[in-house]
Amino acid sequence: MGHQKIIVDTSAWIEYFKNNQDYVQFIEDSLNLENILISGLIISELLHGVKSEKEYELLSESISAVPYAECIYEDWITTGEMLYNLKKKGITVPLTDVLISAIAIRYLHLINILKVLVK
């Protein structure tokens, strides 16, 4: 088992599946080291974006091999708290991004949003 666990954002998975080399090497290396987790929200977002039945089947098979980070009741509470605290500071963040962060925090894994690293 590898060291640092990460949850790869949906947008990064999309770039990976488009064979964008800025993402492919990192994600494949991390998958080989068993360092990547996936959440149900990310799975749903990915499957929602497919364009054909064949693509749906291939994607379903591919993501089923990635270890799953379960979303539980406490993640929703943490998400609400985080959103509330951000709102008090005048910051608006999509619920989906905060929920993924809450799951990552609970798993005590660092979240890695690849779109920030690659820019």
Image (tube, helix red, strand yellow):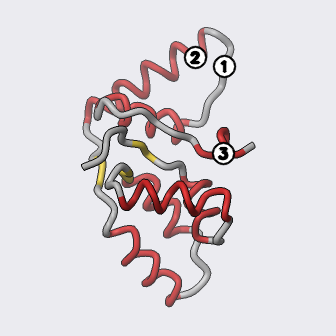
Q: Contact, CB < 8 Å: mark 3 with mark 2? A: no
Number of other residues with Cα within 10 Å of mark 1, as a class: few under 14, some 14 to 19, many 20 or more: few
Residue at numbered disc 3: 115
Residue 42's label in the rendered image is none
Q: Quadrant of residue 88?
A: top right
Q: Secondary structure at mark 1?
A: loop
Distance (Cα) linking label 3 and label 2? 21 Å
Q: Contact, CB < 8 Å: mark 2 with mark 1? A: yes
Where residue 85 sits: x, y (%)?
52, 13
Q: Above or below — where is 27 with respect to 100?
A: below
Where residue 57 sits: x, y (%)?
43, 84
Distance (Cα) linking label 1 and label 3? 20 Å
Q: Residue at x 38, y 35 (%)?
A: 104
Nearer-N-terminus badge (1/3):
1
Q: Residue at x 53, y 83 (%)?
A: 55
Hey, what amino acid is under mark 1?
A: Ile
Between 113 and 21, the one nearer to me in the picture = 21
Q: Quadrant of residue 18?
A: bottom right
Hey, what amino acid is under mark 2?
A: Leu
Q: Above or below — where is 28 with respect to 112?
A: below
Q: Contact, CB < 8 Å: mark 1 with mark 3? A: no
Q: Secondary structure at mark 2?
A: helix
Residue at numbered disc 2: 86
Residue at numbered disc 1: 91
Quarter of the figure with the C terminus: top right
Q: Residue at x 66, y 19 (%)?
A: 91
Between 41 and 30, the one nearer to me in the picture = 30
Number of numbered labels in the structure image: 3
Q: Above or below — where is 119 with respect to 16?
A: above
Number of other residues with Cα within 10 Å of mark 3, as a class: few under 14, some 14 to 19, many 20 or more: some
